[in-house]
Image: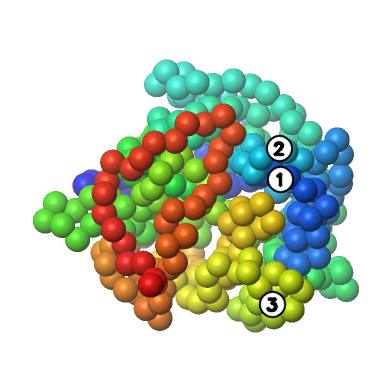
Amino acid sequence: MPICYPANKTAFNIVRCGYIELGVRDLQKSRNFYIDILGLIETQEKDGSIYLRGLEERCHHSVVLTKSESSCVLRMGFQVENEHHLSLLHADLQQTNLYSNFTSAYGVERILQTVDPLGMPIEFYTSMSQVSRSLQKYGSYKGCRPMRLDHFNCFTPDVQKSHDFYSGQLGFHLTEYTETDSENPELWAVWMQRKGNVHDLALTNGVGPRLHHLAFWCPAVTDIIHLCDVMSTTGYLKNMERGPGRHGISNAFFLYVRDPDGHRIELYSSDYLTVDPDFVPIRWGLHDAQRQTLWGHAAPKSWFEEGSHFINTTTSEPQLQAQPIVAN
């Protein structure tokens, strides 16, 4: 099926992925995991929510943990260049008859909410309250030293339709993609960026829309290996789902873990820049053993089946029935 290359040029500029709010059932257990084990910084606790950020982040938060009766995703947002661009984006969504509404949240004065054509709720904003960076407060480093929120990966029941919206209408640049190995190949997954690395958003074939994972960028491979040692000796061995390893896609060194509510988190390093205007998207076949892991190790079954539900969002089965390589 066709890919959008180069991406559609838009009047508005979406800058990067910005924040995510997760519903968690036990706030204290989540605090211990995200701060003491992973190493995120707590900015503030307020009204049943804990606001977190990475070590180099100067915005008030990139992750919010909110006390909830169920494990879910409450919001997921992308930053836009300025208020004028946010208004242009709003007008563009209205022209295609997509739901749009302005609201606000703690630390973010103006948020544009919408729902993509597959029913996934997303938000856009321009600015957030500022705090001091912790980048050079080396004495307070913990866990894997997560620097910043890097990307979201989401299940979608129709990768082609999702790709057409994010790349064709919102201007996300395709960097890598997976196709089926059939005579008439179909898109199985796409990786798309706005900030100039491999991705701000990936979309994978599956029951959706659901969040597959959120990812934090770490400065070194050794930080991720250190986290393995920390988790395996502090009661979190079973929370390590996949890795460490190196992806074929993105070249990233990775570890996937599950938080106390089952939300999947990737700790991520060693990807590459994609800012060149003549960058050509990289194609992978669905059954290429080096696609998932450069070393040839397949992902577990849970990787393709389990994800976090967006609150008040109905899911549907994927239109494409294609089986990837799954670990025994």
Q: Amino acid at mark 2?
A: Glu
3 or 1: tag closer to the N-terminus: 1
Q: Are marks 2 and 1 in contact (CB under 8 Å)?
A: no
2 or 3: tag closer to the N-terminus: 2
Snapshot quadrant of residue 53? bottom right
What is the distance, in whole Å, between disc 3 and disc 1 at their CAs? 23 Å
Q: Amino acid at mark 1?
A: Val
Residue 53 left/right relative to 78: right
What is the distance, in whole Å, between disc 2 and disc 1 at their CAs? 7 Å
Residue displayed at 63% across by 37% down: 75
Residue displayed at 28% across by 58% down: 323
Residue 98, numbered label: none
Quadrant into which the C terminus falls? bottom left
2 or 1: tag closer to the N-terminus: 1
Q: Which residue is mark 2?
A: 69
Closer to us: 167 or 73: 73
Residue 146 left/right relative to 278: right
Q: Position of residue 246 (x, y in %)?
A: 48, 75
Label 3: which secondary element: helix
Label 2 environment density (alpha carbons within 10 Å; few <14, some 14–19, many ≥20):
few
Residue displayed at 68% across by 23% down: 103
Q: Which residue is mark 1?
A: 24
Residue displayed at 26% across by 54% down: 322
Q: Amino acid at mark 3?
A: Ser
Q: Position of residue 259 (x, y in %)?
A: 67, 58
Label 3 environment density (alpha carbons within 10 Å; few <14, some 14–19, many ≥20):
some
Q: Which residue is mark 3?
A: 232
